[in-house]
Image: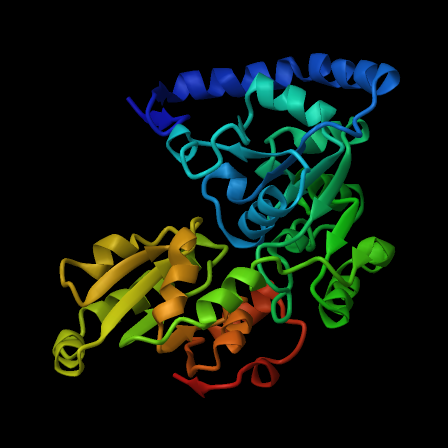
Amino acid sequence: MIKIFDDGQTPMSLFEAKARALLDIATMPIWFGAGLVYNTFFSKTDNPWIISGHRGRIKADNTKSLFNYIVENTDQELKWALEKKQFYKEGVSKNFVKRNSWSARIAILKAPVLIYSHGEDDIDILLRFIRPIVGQRVYIGHGVNMLKRPGLFLAGRRLKGPWKNIVQWLVGLDYDHLLAMSSDEKANWDAVFPDRAEMHLPYGGAARIDSLRAASRHPAEKTIAWLPTFRESHSAEEQLQQQIAAVMNDTNLLPWLDANDYTLFVGSHINSLVNMAELAGESPRVKFANAAEWVDVLAKTELLISDYSSILIDWLLFDRPAVFAPFDLQHYSTVRGFHETYDNYIYGHVA
């Protein structure tokens, strides 16, 4: 029996998972109707905001930093939509709701502001279907948008006519406000979504810079971090796995790390199909780092290796060397698309 863990601990059969999805869809009219009634007779203004990222699976990137700032420095009540119960103890205590639960959906209907870093399903899988009745939706991105076009922009781009609009509505990026870190980043968003330029604000973005600036003050240790970006297709992910495996299996790697007293951290995007922990092996010189740990890893990193990740923009704060490893540059730039040429983006050695 195929098992799906809906809360990280309780297994469901595939049949149960499908039944739950159908129940969600069937009860959506009730949710929508409740929202209309609430909007008619009540005000959302003083209710808690809802925030999430990575579909509630981890606390990381700009949403984590913004969440911490609001909780620590303001009186605004804020709740994080979390997917798994084991994450409920990550310092948020009562400031959470269980993503896709009915208690969370009631909180969503009442919230004046919804904030997310990847898409509306960070908050709830059905949120895009009830857009007319929810509060202001604020997109802050998970990093800085300076090189590659956003993945959700690609949805349906090869289609034409009504099918393109349908696909964009189902899986594309949507928001009422988008927060950029600067006029340059805003210009990139304007180029991608020119009809929404007035929704793009050149301030309030890149909230994680605060934590990165603090991390940059930590003295560098004898640490190398290899943090490749996520590949959208299965075949591209397989190529990435082959590249990482080739390095991990190189007979010169561990002797060099031992001789020079270096530790190599290999990172993985949460959506990656690559099993970094398995590739890293059992050597104490090679360690696995998940996305929620990247800021802590960067704090002690002496040299960063990456490819197209926005973390290379973050790395400028550290004033430490970087190596660019774009082994699939032609394919990635064709599929994803860049705001400018890769040569104009890089500032270090290319491997």
On the question of residue 226 being in view, the answer is no
Q: Nearer the viewer, residue 103 or 325?
A: 103
Which quadrant: the N terminus?
Answer: top left
Identify the coloring.
Answer: rainbow
Q: Quadrant of residue 153?
A: bottom right
In this rendering, does residue 104 appear at all?
yes
Describe residue 186's horizontal placement relative to residue 152 as left or right.
right
Instruction: Give the residue displayed 43% in from the left and 81% down from the top.
Output: 322
Task: Tell me residue 306's x, y (percent).
Answer: 43, 72
Q: Quadrant of residue 265?
A: bottom left
Could you tell whether 169 is left or right of 316 in the image? Answer: right
* Quadrant location of the C terminus in the rendered image: bottom left
Residue for point 43% across, 61% down? 295
Q: Looking at the picture, how far across and down is residue 33, in whole percent?
A: 77, 14
Q: Relative to 215, is 86 above or below?
A: above
Q: Residue at x 58, y 80 (%)?
A: 345
Where 350 sits versus 304, above or below?
below
